[in-house]
Image: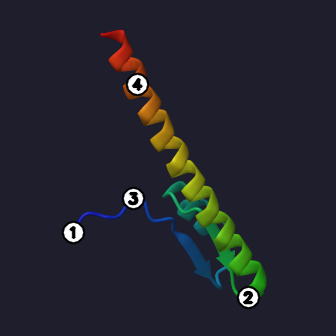
Amino acid sequence: MEPKRDVPVVFFTSGVEAENEVKALAMGAKDFIRKPFVPQVMLNRINNILELDELTKNLERKVEQKTRQVEQLSF
């Protein structure tokens, strides 16, 4: 099974090793949250990640549409 690249990943851990945080972010994690966490802070951070992800996808779609329009005009 191939991994889903369009799903934002957030690591939750009770570990304190900075190297694990660096490794997780280098692997593509959108955030790294240590336990114990404040539920409202965690929810806000996740909502921000999801909102940014959606805005990024919308922007990519618009750029793709504009690129197609320019390509059609070039021919």
Out of 31 and 16, give the one closest to the viewer.
31
| Quarter of the rendering occupied by the N terminus | bottom left
Tag 3 near tag 4, CB within 8 Å: no
Residue 50 seen by the camera:
yes
Q: Which comes before the other along the chain, label 3 or label 4?
A: 3
Residue 6: x percent and y percent? Answer: 42, 59
- Residue extending furthest top? 75
Residue 10: x percent and y percent? Answer: 57, 71
Q: How dense is the environment of label 2, judged by Cα within 10 Å: few (below 14), some, or many (20 and up)?
A: few
Amino acid under disc 1 = Met
Q: Nearer the viewer, mark 2 or mark 4?
A: 4
Residue 17 seen by the camera:
no
Q: Is residue 4 above or below residue 43?
A: above
Q: Which comes before the other along the chain, label 1 or label 2?
A: 1
- Residue at 55% of width from left, 43% of height from top? 59
The quarter holding residue 74 reads top left
Q: Nearer the viewer, mark 1 or mark 4?
A: 4
Tell me how the rendering is colored: rainbow
Dot 3 lies on which element? loop
Q: Which residue is mark 1?
A: 1
Tag 1 near tag 4, CB within 8 Å: no
- Residue at 67% of width from left, 75% of height from top? 33
